[in-house]
Amino acid sequence: MTIRPLDVTGVGVDLPDPVDVRAFAAARGAPVDGYRGWKWACHGGPDDHPSTMGARALDRALADARIPAADLRLVVYCGASRDYPPSWSVATEIMRLTGATDQCLGIDTTAGCLATLTGLDFAHGWLALRGGGHAAVVAAERWTHTVDHGDPASSALWGYGDGAAAAVVALDTGAPGRLRFVGAEFCSRAAFNGYVRIEYGGTRSPLAPAGEDPHRRRVVGRSRDEVIAAYRDGYAGAYAALQARFPSEPTHLVCNQISPGVVGIISSELGLSDRTTVTGHDTGHLGGPDVLVGLRRYLDEGRRDRAIVMAASASFAFGTGLLVADGSPESQTPDASPPAGPAGSTKGVTP
C-alpha cells in the first residue's frame, strides 16, 4: 500500500517566558553546583493552560499555512497535560478557541514526550482513509508546577518547561508543504513505564495523604546506567526500523530531551552528532512540543536538508520520524508498508 507523504504546511509555537533554572532552584534552597541540565526553562503563567497555549500555537500554524480553521478535518491533541480530567477534551476545546467547525473531529492522545510523532502518523493514516484534506497536530505541556525545584533528588526534572506547538498538515490538497512527513517507526520498553510519574490522582491513589503535594512528579526505580542503556537501544531500534522502511541518508536531526547529555547520546547513536537542532537551553524540555519547536527553529534558520530525522521518546517508548524536502526522491513514491520480515517491524528491532 503506497500513501503519499503528508505535507507540513504550517508550524506555530507558543512559549511562556523562560526562567534561569539554576537561579530558580537556588532561590528554593537547592544546591545547584552539580546541575548540568538545561540553562533556561519556560514557566507558564496563570492563564497558560494546555488548551490556551495549544490554541495560540495552532492559530500561528494556521497563519503560517495560510488556511482558515474551518478547513481542518481533524485536530489531534498530543500532550500529557490537561486543563481538566477526561472525558473533557483538550482537542475539542482547541477547536472551539480557534474556530474549527463541527465537521472537524477532535481526538486526545497520550504517549508521553513521544506523542507528537504518533500524532503525525495518526493524522497521516486518518486523512489517507478519507481522501485527504487538512489536519492539525497540537502538543502542549504545563508541568513545571509538578516539579520540586527545591529537592536535589528531582534535579533531573528541573529543566522541564511549559509551552505548546502545532503543525498543520495536508494530504492531497495540491498545496506544497514546507517539508513532507513520510512516516515514523517506534520501539517500546514497557518495563520502564512509571520511571517518571505523578503518584496521586489516578484510580490507585486518587487522593494524596495530608501534607503531600498531589501534583509532585517523581523519578523512581532506575539507575542512570540502566536508563542510558535503554535510550541507546530504544533509539537504535526505532531508527533501524525507519531506515529499513524508508531507505535514506538523513543529514540533520531535530531533537530535544530531558537534558543536553541525553540529546548527545541520541545524536551520537543516530550518527548525526553536531548536525542537530536543539532548543533546550532556551526553552527547557517541553515534552511533546519539543520536536515541533525544533522544526520551527529549523525552518526559521533557512536550512534545506534533503532528509531530516525527528527523534523523541518517553521512558517507555522511542520513535524516529522522517521528513524530506519537497521534490526529493523520497518525497515522491514512498512505500508506507514495512517490508516483509523482522527487518521492517518494530518487533524485530525492539531490544
Image: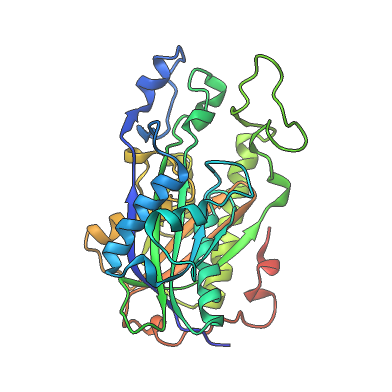
Please give the name of the residue rendered at 60% of the width and 35% of the height, measured from the top-left corner: 224
Please give the name of the residue rendered at 51% of the width and 56% of the height, measured from the top-left corner: 92
**Quadrant in the rendering for residue 226:** top right
Residue 311 percent location from the top left of the image: 48, 57
Up the image or down, 321 lies above or below 40; here it is below
Up the image or down, 327 lies above or below 145; here it is below
Please give the name of the residue rendered at 33% of the width and 38% of the height, measured from the top-left corner: 16
In the picture, measured across the screen, residue 153 lies left or right of residue 56, that is: right
Is any atom of residue 275 visible in this view?
Answer: no
In the picture, which quadrant includes the C terminus? bottom right
Residue 334 percent location from the top left of the image: 48, 84
Residue 77 percent location from the top left of the image: 51, 56
Please give the name of the residue rendered at 54% of the width and 30% of the height, measured from the top-left corner: 146
Coloured how? Answer: rainbow
Which residue is the extreme one toward the right? 204
In the picture, which quadrant includes the N terminus? bottom right
Which residue is the extreme one toward the front? 102
**Quadrant in the rendering for residue 214:** top right
How many numbered marks, from 0 up?
Answer: 0
In the picture, measured across the screen, residue 194 lies left or right of residue 119, that is: right
Residue 71 percent location from the top left of the image: 38, 72
Is any atom of residue 179 visible in this view?
Answer: yes
